[in-house]
C-alpha cells in the first residue's frame, strides 16, 4: 500500500516532467519520416480498414446489435472498439521496453523512474485523443450524434489510462529483469485483439454454454471497449447499469497497481545491473 | 571542515555467468550460480568540501565503477555512500539522444536533472555558447562528431551548476582550445569551492589540477593522499609496470590481491 502511494505521488509531483518528456518521445520517434506524426493516425487507420474488410466479409456485412433493438453497421462498431485497443496495444508494447531502453539516459540519482512507463503511455495518449476526435466526427456524419451518454467517455478514458498504467508498471519492471518478456508480449499480445470483443461481438457465442462468455468477460479490456461503445452509440450508462462489472474492473486495476508498485520499488535501484 | 563525500566500505560485486542458463538459474533459484567478480572491495575515502580528487590506476582498477557509484548511477553491493549536494557525472557518452537536435537534448537533459522551465530557458543560451556548436545546435545529435557530442555533454553538465562534479575521461576528447576552455571552467569551479572528482589517465592534467589522489589497484585503495605524495609513487609504479612481461604482471596482481586480503583479515 505504501509503495502504491509513493508511486502515485511521484506521478503527481513530476507532472510537468511527464508532459515534456512525452512530447519529446513523440518528436524523436517521428523525426525520420517526412510525414512525421501523421503516421500515428495513418497506421491505425489502415489497420482498421483491413480488419473491416476481412471481418466484414466474413460476417457477410451483417450489422451488430449493440443494444436490444439497436443495430449499427459493423464498421462503426469496429471503429469504436479498435481505437481503444490500439491505444492499449501500443502503450503496453512500448511500455514494456520503456525502462530498459531508457535506463542509460535516465539513471540519475534522483530521477523518479516510475514515471518512465507513464510518459510513454502519455505519448500514445495524445494520439488516442486525436483518434477519438476523428471517430466522433465520423460518427456525426454517420448519424450517431453527440448525446448525454458521451459524458461517460471521460470516465472510461480515465479508467483506460489507469488500467494501462497498472499493467505497464508490472511488465516494464519484469521485462527489465527478464528481457524475454518483451519479446513474448510483442508476439502474443496481438492475440488479445481477437478475444477482447473488438472484431466480433461476444453474442456469437450464444450457442455455447454461457461460461465461455463469462470467461471472456473476465478480460478488463472488454469492459472498457463496451463502455466506449455505449458512450459513442448512446445506448446506456454502461458503468452504472453493470455496476458489478465496474467493481470487478477496479478491483483488478488496484490489485495490479499495488503489485506493480511493490515490484517496481523493490527492483528499481538495481535496474542498471540488469543491463 | 564540512565533508562533501563520505564513502564507507564500498564493495561492488558483479556476477560472471557462463551463458544464459546460469543467469536464469541464479535469478529463480535460491542457490548461488556464477562466479563473483569484485570490481571494488572495501573502498573507503572522504572528500572535504572544495577538494579536487583525482582517481588514478591502471585499466580495470575500478575507477569508473567508483565514480559511477558516487554519482548514484550504479548501486553499491554493500557499504554506504553519503554525498552532500547534487552530483553530476560527465562522461564521454553522456546520455544524449541521437534522434533529437542539440537544442532538444539540452532541454531534455536539464529536465532530468530536475530543473524547471524558467531555469532551462535561462541556461540554454549559455550552454549553446559554451558548446561552440553554432548552427549545428539545431541538427540531430547523431550527425555530430564525437568531439561535438562530448562538447555538448560537457557544456550541459558544467552549466547546470552542480555541487559535485565528476569528470570521467571527458576532457580527452575535443581539441586543445576546447579542453583549455574546459579547464578554465573547472578552475573557476575550484575557486568557487566546489568538490570535484577527476578520472583520467593524463598525469599532466591531474598534477595541474588535483589536490588529492586516490590510487586504486584491482578494486582496492592502494593509497590516498596529497598529489605530491602519491603521484611520484604512481609514476614510479607505472614505469616498473610497463617493463613487466605478461607473466610478471599476473604474478604482481596475485601478490597485490593476496596482501590486500591479509590486510583485511587483520
Image (cartoon, rainbow, N blue to C red):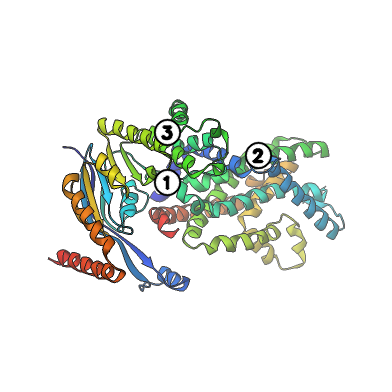
Marks 3/1: CA–CA distance: 22 Å
Q: Position of residue B169 (x, y in %)?
A: 36, 47
Q: Which of B187/A1 is in front?
A: B187
Q: Secondary structure at mark 2?
A: helix
Q: Which mark is residue B81?
A: none
Marks 1/2: CA–CA distance: 40 Å
Camera-near label (3 vs 1) is 1
Q: Position of residue A107 (x, y in %)?
A: 42, 48
Q: Which residue is mark 1?
A: B92
Q: Is residue A68 above or below residue B23?
A: above
Host chain of mark 1: B
Q: Residues within 10 Å of mark 2 (few under 14, many from 20)?
A: some
Marks 3/2: CA–CA distance: 29 Å
Host chain of mark 2: A
Please tell me which residue is depicted at 34% across the width and 48% down the height of the picture.
B72
Q: Position of residue B167 (x, y in %)?
A: 34, 43
Q: Which of A245/A53 is in front?
A: A53
Q: Which mark is residue A129?
A: 2
* Earlier-in-chain disc, 3 versus 1: 1
Q: Secondary structure at mark 3?
A: loop
Please tell me which residue is depicted at 40% across the width and 58% down the height of the picture.
A273
Please tell me which residue is depicted at 36% across the width and 35% down the height of the picture.
B180
Q: Which residue is mark 3?
A: B115
Amino acid at each position: 500500500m505504501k509503495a502504491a502511494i509513493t508511486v502515485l505521488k511521484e506521478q503527481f509531483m513530476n507532472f510537468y516532467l511527464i508532459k515534456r518528456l512525452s512530447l519529446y518521445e513523440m518528436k524523436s520517434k517521428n523525426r525520420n519520416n517526412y510525414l512525421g506524426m501523421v503516421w500515428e493516425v495513418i497506421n491505425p487507420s489502415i489497420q482498421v480498414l483491413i480488419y473491416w474488410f476481412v471481418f466484414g466479409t466474413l460476417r457477410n456485412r451483417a450489422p451488430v446489435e449493440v443494444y436490444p433493438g439497436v443495430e449499427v453497421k459493423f464498421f462503426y462498431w469496429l471503429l469504436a472498439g479498435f481505437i481503444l485497443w490500439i491505444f492499449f496495444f501500443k502503450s503496453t508494447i512500448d511500455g514494456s521496453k520503456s525502462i530498459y531502453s531508457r535506463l542509460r539516459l535516465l539513471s540519475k540519482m534522483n530521477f523518479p523512474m516510475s514515471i518512465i512507463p507513464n510518459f510513454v503511455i502519455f505519448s500514445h495518449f495524445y494520439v488516442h485523443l486525436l483518434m477519438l476526435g476523428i471517430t466522433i466526427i465520423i460518427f456525426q456524419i454517420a448519424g450517431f450524434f453527440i448525446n448525454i451518454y458521451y459524458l461517460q467517455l471521460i470516465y472510461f478514458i480515465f479508467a483506460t489510462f489507469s488500467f494501462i498504467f497498472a499493467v505497464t508498471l508490472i511488465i516494464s519492471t519484469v521485462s527489465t529483469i527478464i528481457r524475454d518478456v518483451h519479446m513474448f508480449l510483442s508476439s502474443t499480445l496481438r492475440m488479445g485483439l481477437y478475444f477482447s470483443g473488438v472484431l466480433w461481438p461476444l453474442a456469437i457465442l450464444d450457442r455455447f454454454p454461457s461460461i465461455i462468455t463469462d470467461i471472456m468477460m473476465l478480460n478488463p479490456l472488454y469492459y472498457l471497449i463496451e463502455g466506449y461503445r455505449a458512450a459513442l452509440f448512446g445506448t446506456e450508462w454502461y458503468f452504472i447499469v453493470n455496476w458489478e462489472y465496474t467493481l470487478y474492473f477496479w478491483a483488478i486495476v488496484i490489485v495490479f497497481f499495488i503489485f506493480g508498485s511493490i515490484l517496481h520499488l523493490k527492483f528499481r535501484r538495481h535496474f542498471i545491473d540488469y543491463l | 571542515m564540512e565533508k562533501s563525500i563520505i564513502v564507507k566500505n564500498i564493495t561492488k560485486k558483479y556476477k560472471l555467468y557462463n551463458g544464459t542458463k546460469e543467469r536464469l538459474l541464479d535469478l529463480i533459484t535460491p542457490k548461488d550460480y556464477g562466479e563473483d567478480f569484485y570490481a571494488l572491495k572495501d573502498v573507503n575515502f572522504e572528500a572535504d568540501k572544495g577538494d579536487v580528487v583525482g582517481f588514478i590506476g591502471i585499466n580495470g582498477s575500478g575507477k569508473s565503477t567508483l565514480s559511477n557509484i558516487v554519482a548514484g548511477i550504479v548501486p553499491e553491493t554493500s557499504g554506504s555512500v553519503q554525498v552532500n549536494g547534487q552530483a553530476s557525472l560527465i562522461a564521454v557518452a553522456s546520455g544524449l539522444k541521437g534522434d533529437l537536435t542539440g537544442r532538444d537534448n539540452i532541454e531534455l537533459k536539464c529536465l532530468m536533472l530536475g530543473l524547471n522551465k524558467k531555469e532551462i530557458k535561462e541556461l540554454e543560451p549559455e550552454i549553446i555558447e559554451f558548446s561552440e556548436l553554432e548552427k549545428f545546435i539545431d541538427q540531430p545529435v547523431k550527425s555530430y562528431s564525437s568531439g561535438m557530442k562530448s562538447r555538448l555533454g560537457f557544456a550541459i553538465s558544467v552549466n547546470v551548476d552542480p555541487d559535485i562534479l565528476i569528470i570521467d575521461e571527458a576532457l580527452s576528447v575535443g581539441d586543445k582550445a576546447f579542453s583549455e576552455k574546459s579547464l578554465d571552467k573547472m578552475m573557476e569551479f575550484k575557486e568557487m569551492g566546489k568538490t570535484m572528482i577527476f578520472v583520467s589517465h593524463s598525469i599532466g592534467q591531474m598534477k595541474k589540477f588535483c589536490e588529492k589522489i586516490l590510487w586504486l589497484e584491482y578494486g582496492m585503495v592502494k593509497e590516498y593522499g596529497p598529489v605530491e605524495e602519491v603521484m611520484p609513487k604512481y609514476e614510479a609504479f607505472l614505469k616498473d609496470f610497463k617493463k613487466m612481461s605478461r607473466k610478471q604482471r599476473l604474478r604482481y596482481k596475485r601478490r597485490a590481491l593476496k596482501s590486500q586480503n591479509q590486510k583485511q583479515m587483520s
